[in-house]
């Protein structure tokens, strides 16, 4: 096997895990009825002509189980942060007090729970597609190595089976994370 054309299953497994990590971050932004600073992580604020994560314009804290608080560092950024929250489709209504925004977390209605479950399903499906794309890349790489004569057909099939096993394992993990998130969303 040529040294520069070696197949490394670990690189594909780490790419698949990266997809799962991204999905976990997206799940953190889904509201489950209790306050969590992770809820605001996906939010970006349009400020000074560029988009900035909310944690770069202020500090987010959880003073109570049903309240988030953002202490904005720059008074001129308060309106932009408030606008980003209102347009985020999180169902939150900020109360502004100087440079502090308080976000009461209302209890979830059944309709909102269903919407959040759909969003969670969409995130999970996007993650599954991402994992399958990594699998496709791995299989294409293996086919190229076999075609170039760097590996035998048997080695290509064995490595392909490893890629498929990794894919199945990661998709099972995605399904388990989705089930957990749906349970969290539907808790009364």
Image: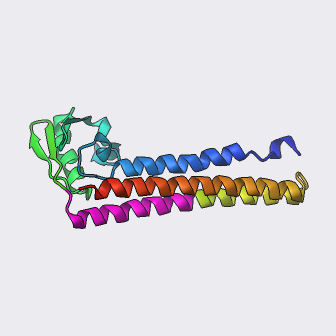
Q: Is residue 149 left or right of residue 157?
A: right
Q: Which of these two is toward me, 93 or 47?
A: 93
Residue 180 is at least partly visible in this image: yes
First to last magenta residue range: 108-130
- Give the number of marks: 0
Going 29% across and 45% down the picture, which residue do you hit?
40
Asked if residue 24 lies in the magenta stretch, the reply is: no
Asked if residue 119 lies in the magenta stretch, the reply is: yes
Going 29% across and 59% down the picture, which residue do you hit?
186
Going 28% across and 40% down the picture, which residue do you hit?
37
Q: Is residue 25 left or right of residue 143?
A: left
Q: Which of these two is toward me, 175 or 5?
A: 175
Whole-percent x, y for residue 177 in the image: 45, 52
Whole-percent x, y for residue 107 in the image: 17, 54
Whole-percent x, y for residue 146 in the image: 86, 58
* Image-quadrant location for residue 53: top left
Above/below status of 147 relative to 62: below
Q: Which of these two is toward me, 59 or 163?
A: 163
- Magenta: main secondary structure equals helix
Residue 145 is at least partly visible in this image: no
Whole-percent x, y for residue 168 in the image: 62, 57
- Quarter of the picture containing the C terminus is bottom left
Q: Is residue 134 left or right of residue 178?
A: right
């Amino acid at each position: 096997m040529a040294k520069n054309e070696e197949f490394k299953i670990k690189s594909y497994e780490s790419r698949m895990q990266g997809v799962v990590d991204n999905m976990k971050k997206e799940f953190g932004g889904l509201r489950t009825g209790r306050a969590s600073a992770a809820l605001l992580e996906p939010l970006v604020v349009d400020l000074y002509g560029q988009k900035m994560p909310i944690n770069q314009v202020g500090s987010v804290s959880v003073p109570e189980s049903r309240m988030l608080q953002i202490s904005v560092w720059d008074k001129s950024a308060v309106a932009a942060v408030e606008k980003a929250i209102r347009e985020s489709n999180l169902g939150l209504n900020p109360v502004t007090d100087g440079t502090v925004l308080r976000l009461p977390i209302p209890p979830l209605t059944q309709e909102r729970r269903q919407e959040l479950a759909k969003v969670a399903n969409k995130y999970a499906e996007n993650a599954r597609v991402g994992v399958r794309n990594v699998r496709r890349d791995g299989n294409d790489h293996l086919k190229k190595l076999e075609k170039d004569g760097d590996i035998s057909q048997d080695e290509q099939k064995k490595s392909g089976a490893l890629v498929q096993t990794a894919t199945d394992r990661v998709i099972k993990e995605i399904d388990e994370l989705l089930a957990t998130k749906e349970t969290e969303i539907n808790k009364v």
